[in-house]
Image: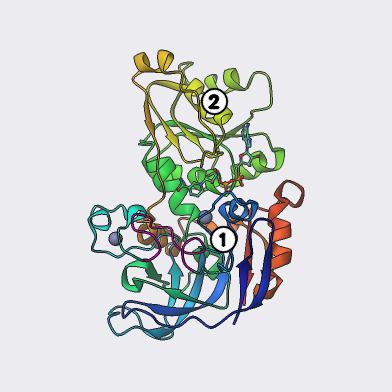
Amino acid sequence: MKALVYHGPGNKAWEEVPDPQLREPTDVIVQIDTTTICGTDLHILKGDVPAVTDGRVLGHEGVGTVTAVGSAVNSLSDGDRVIISCITSCGSCSYCQRQLPSHCLADEGTSGIGWIFGHLIDGTQAEYVRVPFADTSLYKLPEGVGDEAAAMLSDILPTGFEIGVRNGRVKPGDVVAVVGAGPVGLSAIMTAGLYGAARVIAIDLDDNRRELAKSFGATDSVDSGAAGWRDQVLAMTDGLGVDVAIEAVGIPQTFDMCTQLIRPGGTVANVGVHGAPVELQLQDLWIKDVAITTGLVSATTTSMLLKLVAQGKLHPEQFVTHRFKLDEVMDAYDTFGRAAETKAIKVALAR
Ligand SMILES: NC(=O)c1ccc[n+]([C@@H]2O[C@H](COP(=O)([O-])OP(=O)(O)OC[C@H]3O[C@@H](n4cnc5c(N)ncnc54)[C@H](O)[C@@H]3O)[C@@H](O)[C@H]2O)c1
Ligand SMILES: [Zn+2]
Ligand SMILES: [Zn+2]
């Protein structure tokens, strides 16, 4: 088969590799119908994720059709259309039982890490992929849910919802600020309404993304490059700050912005992946009863989000701005990698 293979920082190729085979009785093989590229893949290509080694097939998102089923798999058959979750869950370890498969202790990849596709085992930017623990790591697609919408449920929508909205404890009537309106921030914006947010403020430097955020459910937007950005946000509250501030960038500056916007008793939910230490202004924050949460997505809300998509209550297909064939993956990376110029949010790659 053909797959996108990582060959060290800055190097990748769409090339011939051996077809994946069933290895464990709990595996299935999935033929990829639609996959996509994540910002994390760009980090890997920069060399920021050393656990990804030469020869690894990239990708941890996608939708496909089951073509082979291991002897211990109970709930899946050949021909089933499935969403491949970015988190693999054995279903039986202590973390999976606590609904935290992001720390799954199974011995696929490395014990304690649930994100294994395109990281510790071969991933989904390929014609076929081997899926371990298939019964608990795949979601059958109901009739009427399109591939592009479904592919957004592999990673970004659960991430924005679980680590942003749910960890942020959004409640009815809240004012929510989302700093960073990329795919993950837009996912938090799209799902903040599920818990009744009254006002959702999209904060970004990029004019296009701020404008786009309104079609994902933002009621307001603020340019964080403008001098009065903080006053503009506070004016959208009772003056005391927002109830929930969601950090969806991953740099010290934007984390600090969240702590400057939060009202007493509020929650800062950090979603961004940070590569550098952040200076925490604890001398100001302790007396404000501020909670700070962190997390790696577990994707335990995928089934729930899928129901809302099937009912037409969420429309994640709107993330897809550019479409390619699977074998045009090199062009797709180029477009996605220059998102500020191309205005790409998510690219869809279909077979
Ligand atoms: N916690 C998790 O499980 C998890 C999962 C997936 C992704 N992530 C992380 O979430 C973050 C967002 O992911 P993404 O794919 O949406 O990234 P992205 O790079 O596409 O989007 C980031 C956005 O932040 C904006 N931005 C940059 N500097 C800013 C500033 N100073 N003020 C306001 N906005 C600014 C950019 O214009 C961009 O729109 C990343 O750090 C990613 O690694 C976390
Ligand atoms: Zn991802
Ligand atoms: Zn587990």
| Majority secondary structure in the magenta region | loop
* Residues packed near mark 2 inside 10 Å, few (<14), some (14 to 19) or many (20 plus): some
Q: Is residue 166 left or right of residue 181?
A: left
Residue depicted at 71% across the width and 71% down the height: 328
Magenta range: 108-121
Q: Which amino acid does label 2 sit on?
A: Met
Per the model, the C-alpha gap separating discs 2 and 1 is 30 Å
The relative height of residue 201 versus residue 236 in the rendered view (above or below) is below
The answer to whether 197 appears left or right of 351 in the picture is: left
* Residue 121, percent from left and from top: 47, 67
Q: Does mark 2 have its CB less than 8 Å from ligand 1?
A: yes
According to the picture, the residue beneath numbered tag 1 turns out to be: 317
> What is the number of the mark on residue 257?
2
Which sits in the foreground, 226 or 339? 339
Q: Locate the C terminus and report the quarter of the image it occupies.
A: bottom right
Q: Which picture quadrant has residue 349?
A: bottom right
Name the N-terminal-most of marks 2 and 1.
2
Q: Which amino acid does label 1 sit on?
A: Glu
Of marks 2 and 1, the one in the foreground: 2
- The image quadrant of residue 58 is bottom right
